[in-house]
Image: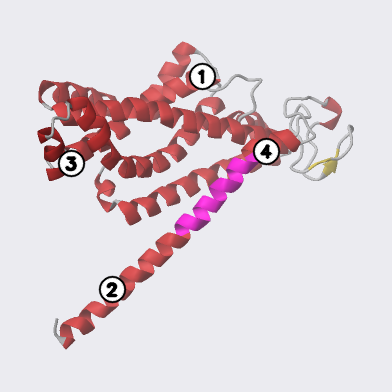
Amino acid sequence: MTASTATLAAPFSGGGRMRNHVGRIRIIVCSAIVAIYALAAIIGPIILRFDPVRTETQDRLLPPGSAVSTGGFALLGTDQVGQDVFAQMLMGARISMLVGVSTLLLAGLIGITMGLVAGFFGGWLDSVLMRLADIQLSFPSILLAIFIAAVVGPSVTNVIIVLAISNWVTFARVTRGQVLALKNREYVDAARTLGAGNLHLILKTILPGCIAPVLVVATVELGHVILAEASLSFLGLGVPANVPSWGATISNGRTYLGDAWWISTFPGVALALLVLTFGILGDALRDRFDPKLRSI
């Protein structure tokens, strides 16, 4: 490299280091925010004094910081039936995390299996599975989820199944693309030459190479799933009415925005921050580990 070439390349290499540094900061900050949400969801409802579904009509529509009749105070106020908004938010965080993680596990299991089979065997099986994926992609996922939820009815289990059915395609496409890139590598041919069967090749040789891109996609999809669960609950098609959730709390408070803005505002801000955090975290991980996923 000549001196002039090195001089021209230096700013670009410095810019790359700066982008990597910024990316690491984004990952650390977003991970810390997600950890706070997870701790609040796991520990908060255990140590909180207030029952999120207990109604105290004499304490209805109290603003944030008000004292309540049972002692203590309502940190984020109460709703139209006297339920503590902060308690509902903590329990709603638990429901959102439970639904989000469970949905991704189920959707990932379905999608990764489909992608491995389609990418490894190819042929008519690949065509059938990918055409099925294309058909599902032709429908907006939230509309498909609303339709299925309206048929099966509201429950936590049904929401998980509905959202898993609506989100397996992304995992299938990413896994299939990775399998196509790996199945003709030298180490796969070497394992095949040594007598490894198809199942061993898929699970022991190819699948480990698919884990990193799948985890990146899962991080992005987790925010989408949590938002979809809140949307279904907002419409009354998500979790049952007696189970606190961010979507239901926002829906309950929409008619009181003028007099009791806190009912919908605080859960809405919490939901928006968590979804935004997962989006930024997923983008940072994608830029750092697998920029090719931006084309998917």
Residue 150 covered by magenta stretch: no
Name the residue located 60 percent from the left edge and 47 percent from the top edge. 36
Q: Which residue is mark 4?
A: 43
The prevailing secondary structure element of the residues shown in magenta is: helix
As measured in the structure, the alpha-carbon distance from the residue carrying label 4 to the one carrying label 1 is 22 Å
Give the residue type that dot 4 points to: Ile
As measured in the structure, the alpha-carbon distance from the residue carrying label 3 to the one carrying label 2 is 30 Å
Q: Which residue is mark 1?
A: 157
Labels 3 and 1: the sequence-earlier one: 1
Establish if 237 lies above or below 273: above
Q: Which residues are magenta?
A: 26-40
Left or right: 184 in relation to 57 = left
As measured in the structure, the alpha-carbon distance from the residue carrying label 2 to the one carrying label 4 is 45 Å
Labels 3 and 4: the sequence-earlier one: 4
As measured in the structure, the alpha-carbon distance from the residue carrying label 3 to the one carrying label 4 is 42 Å
Q: Which residue is mark 3?
A: 182
In the displayed orientation, state which residue is furthest to the bottom: 3
Labels 3 and 2: the sequence-earlier one: 2
- Pick the residue in front: 149 or 175: 175
Q: Are marks 3 and 2 in contact (CB under 8 Å)?
A: no
Q: Are marks 2 and 1 in contact (CB under 8 Å)?
A: no
Q: How many marks?
A: 4
